[in-house]
Amino acid sequence: MTLPKVSVIGAGQVGSTTAHLLALKGLADVTLIDVVDGLAQGKALDITQASPIEGFGGRVQGTTDYAAMADSRLVIVTAGLARKPGMSRDDLLAANAAIVGPIAERISRLAPDAIVIVVTNPLDVMVALAIKRSGFPRQRVMGMAGVLDSARLRAFIAQQLGIASTEVETMVLGSHGDLMVPLKRFTQLKGKPIDTWLNDAQIEDLFQRTKDAGAELVRLLKQGSAFYAPASGVVEMAGAILGDAHKILPICAWLEGEYGLRDVCIGVPAQLGSRGIDRVIELELTVQERQALSASAEQVRIMIQQLVVLDAFRSNNAIMENKP
Ligand code: TXD
């Protein structure tokens, strides 16, 4: 059986786990690319050696050569730095923009028909940058965060109630950060609203824990950040796209008027299929919910402006010609 080709840029924690899951689920032939010589090759070889045990047939290859992403159906961008002690948010923004911008240009040259899922932080801004630098239509470039944030909240609610996490439905919108917007009205179990199961203080605690979930993991792990659940989030989106499933998932998308917002990337529900984002779904939000989403979008807009000041949206062909 011919499998679609998926390239994963960055063979670190999230990238390699994503490659592993894509292979295990039989979703794709995977090309893993990293600037560190041997890293992607080693991870790919290791995953391949699991194939006789796990029974998957997809090919997994690793390389430092970006040209290997040619003709990918889907490119997943996980390359970048995580925040280290002493680094400001602006430092991370500039450093990861210098990685993601050139990668987006390479994707547009080497895989011009690909759909792109960005994972690198600061997520919402990196999606905007990838759209600008690839020149791709907004339907074909999106970010993964809402699936993860929603999954975290579902897991926390399930733990608290002692029920299966798959029974919990929820929707976390907004930016991937302090101003994310968990929607209480869209959180339910078996059609019964969450406030019939938990009181307001309990719900608020779980919302706050969801907002802090990334930091909680960084604290526990002591080095690096979350990767199992983030990779599962990416693979859920990849599965919806590759399988043309028309599934509705919370994703980071460029908005052009939806929710009264434009020229900004933010987490919203969207229907995913083989062309990428089929459409952004506009939920009926209350005034407060809409205000929370706008506040979140404003924060992203400020960071987009910082990239404008850094001149990061301008393409740099010299970088494009360099090998990694
Ligand atoms: O919800 C979400 N969107 C997130 C985002 C959830 C978890 C992690 N999130 C962010 O993803 C995180 O803050 C980072 O910005 C990225 C990747 O996280 P990961 O944990 O995988 O980081 P690693 O393990 O440091 O891996 C990054 C790899 C590393 O192997 C580098 O050598 C490589 O990226 N790298 C590159 N590869 C290819 N090309 C270039 N230019 C490059 N630069 C670095």
Image: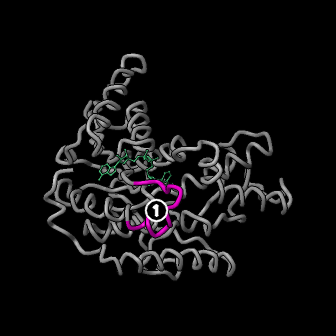
**Vertical placement of 31 versus 272: above or below?**
above
Task: Say which residue appears at 49% left-offset and 57% top-offset.
Answer: 83
Q: Is residue 210 magenta?
A: no
**Vertical placement of 87 versus 225: above or below?**
below
Q: Is residue 90 magenta?
A: yes
Q: Is residue 85 left or right of residue 50?
A: right
Q: Position of residue 316 (x, y in %)?
A: 19, 69
Q: Quadrant of residue 3?
A: top left
Q: Nearer the viewer, residue 121 or 127?
A: 121
The colouring scheme, among rainbow, by chain, secondary structure or one colour, is one colour
Q: Quadrant of residue 94?
A: bottom left
Categorize mark 1 by other alpha carbons within 10 Å: few (<14), some (14-19), many (20+).
Answer: many
**Residue segment shown in magenta:** 81-94
The answer, for residue 225, to whether it is visible in the render is yes
Q: Is residue 106 left or right of residue 154?
A: left
The residue most toward the top is: 53
Q: Residue under circle 1?
A: 123
Q: Is residue 71 left or right of residue 282?
A: left
* Amino acid residing under circle 1: Leu
Task: Say which residue appears at 45% left-offset and 48% top-offset.
Answer: 234
Task: Say which residue appears at 44% left-offset and 81% top-offset.
Answer: 262
The residue most toward the front is: 86
Task: Say which residue appears at 41% left-offset and 17% top-offset.
Answer: 53
The answer, for residue 4, to whether it is visible in the render is no
Q: Secondary structure at mark 1?
A: helix
